[in-house]
Image (tube, grey):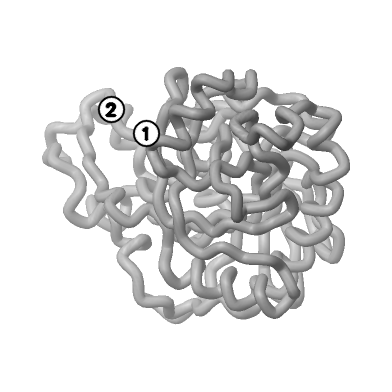
Amino acid sequence: MTGLRGRIGLIGGSGLYDLPGLATTAEVRLSTPFGEPSDAFLVGELSGVPVAFLARHGRGHRILPSEINYRANVWGFRQIGCDALISASACGSMKEAYRPTDLVLPDQFVDRTRRRGATFFGEGCVAHVSLAHPVCPGLLETLDVTARERGARVHRGGTYLGIEGPQFSTKAESLLYRSWGVDVVGMTNVTEARLCREAEICYATMALVTDYDCWHEEEQAVTVEVLLGVLRANAGSANAIFAAAVPRIDAARRCGCREALRTAVLTRREDVPEATRLRLSLLMEKYWG
């Protein structure tokens, strides 16, 4: 892949609505073929590197996990030149050893969402990207090394279970999820990972533990009140890791993320309806010409 540095996308979840240290040069509001993103993109530099930051739930936390326009968000990052995306999000721990304020760097996902647009394709164009390894190994390595240097308690690898929400789990659900062997549970990252692969954007996420969901007999079941104090601590940790990790991202990383569509599209270009070809041109122009 090219060694030219693309812009790095950063997305903040619950408790992370802005990015201290970002030298903002513009607030960019985009209209995409899939509608409006969650908020304006804050475009500028962080630690001397071109970045774009987006508050996943909108500033002020106005958008439910099910209401987030994931397609518009990811499309927007691609449209403004991002070839890598690091996200931060709150999550519940499914394991005793993963404590509140710990950082989990999942490398696998299980999708239990139900009502989301999770592909850019359709309407006359069929694509099947590989999601066997949904997280970019280069980004994962950078986050792991950087977070440990910053003193975070890090758990590398593991499975993130994506649920629809917005309600937290019932105890029966929480115990079921534990029996599956997943590591953390959340409501947002799995959809982003799917779309980033289709958009040929390298993706990795920092899952910031806030609670033990409701399976733990000796811990209080998760509530918004419980979350708020932990969210503040997690936001500070995420901001510091963002700032330290961004300059270390290898522009020439050797992964297949940025060529995920090369053999994924089954429909011949000439058989794709013109409106669909135009809609997908941002993703497919290098293959269709």
Residue 76 point in image, percent of width and height: 56, 44
In-image side of 97 versus 251 (left or right) = right
Within 10 Å of the Cα at label 2, are there few (<14), some (14-19), or many (20+) other Cα atoms?
few
Q: Which residue type carries mark 1?
A: Thr
Left or right: 156 in relation to 235: left
Which residue is label 2 attached to? 122
Distance between the Cα atoms at labels 1 and 2? 8 Å
**In which quadrant is the N terminus drawn?**
bottom left
Q: Is residue 81 visible?
A: no
Percent x, y of residue 103: 65, 58
Examine the rendered structure and indicate whether residue 182 appears above or below residue 135: above
Screen quadrant of the C terminus: bottom left
Q: Which residue is mark 1?
A: 119
Mark 1 neighbour density, 10 Å: few (under 14) some (14–19) many (20 or more): some
Mark 2: secondary structure? loop
Which residue lies at the image location 60% right of the left edge and 55% below the top edge? 97
Quadrant for residue 152, please give it.
Answer: bottom right
Which residue is painted at 74% across and 54% down in the image? Answer: 101
Front one among 116 and 141: 141
Identify the disc placed on residue 229: none
Q: Dot 1 lies on which element?
A: loop
Q: Residue shown at 28%/27% (left/top)?
A: 122
Mark 1 near mark 2, Cβ–Cβ under 8 Å? yes
Nearer to the camera, 31 or 159: 159
